[in-house]
Image (spheres, helix red, strand yellow):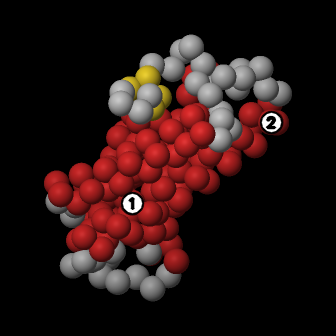
Amino acid sequence: MVEENRTVTGMPEFNVIVYSFLLHFVWEFIQAPTYAGMVEKNHWEGIKLCTSATFGDVGFALTAFWITAVVARSREWMSKPTTTQVLVFLAVGVILTVGFEYYYTNISLRWTYSELMPLVPPFGTGLSPLLQWLIVPMLVIWFSNRKQEKVVTEK
């Protein structure tokens, strides 16, 4: 079991927040052309929109982390994740993504996809946000493990 660190930076949620924010922020900018009107937005408006989306992504990541922690019965599950834990983490993120993308593109119409976005059945979810929730969480786990290994070897 990982030695408990009582500082904020030692909490596993801290890693999820930091790595998720950094990675999702970059992803939001890279995928911007796949959303209608994003290319035409002025620079500051695009930054605000991508930052807002990134905060939502961090919320999804924390939700997925905590649900996985309940299943794992440990908030330290990222230190040695099992296949089941990784799949739960990914599944929660994907389910949230599909639900929110459907709501915002089909019901509230807060955003729409551009012609560059491939759609994935059955709900017409954009491929880019689905890939985001498969790739970024895996990187979050990897970076969190790397940081944890460094902390353990330094002790």
Q: Secondary structure at mark 1?
A: helix
Relative to 105, does residue 152 appear above or below in the rendering?
below
Image location (x, y in percent) of residue 83? 16, 54
Q: Residue at x 44, y 23 (%)?
A: 119
Q: Is residue 12 left or right of residue 91?
A: right
Relative to 77, does residue 39 appear above or below in the rendering?
above
Q: Which residue is mark 1?
A: 64
Q: Is residue 140 left or right of residue 84?
A: right
Residue 80 falls in image quadrant: bottom left
Q: Earlier in the sequence, mark 1 or mark 2?
A: 2
Residue farthest left in this picture: 83
Q: Residues within 10 Å of mark 1 (few under 14, many from 20)?
A: many
Question: Observer-nearest residue: 19 or 91?
Answer: 91
Answer yes or no: is residue 76 visible.
no
Residue type beneath disc 2: Glu
Q: In which quadrant will I find the N terminus?
A: bottom left
Residue type beneath disc 1: Ala
Image location (x, y in percent) of residue 55? 61, 54
Q: Which residue is mark 2?
A: 45
Q: In which quadrant will I find the C terminus?
A: bottom left
Image location (x, y in percent) of residue 16? 45, 60
Residue 63 falls in image quadrant: bottom left
Q: Secondary structure at mark 2?
A: helix
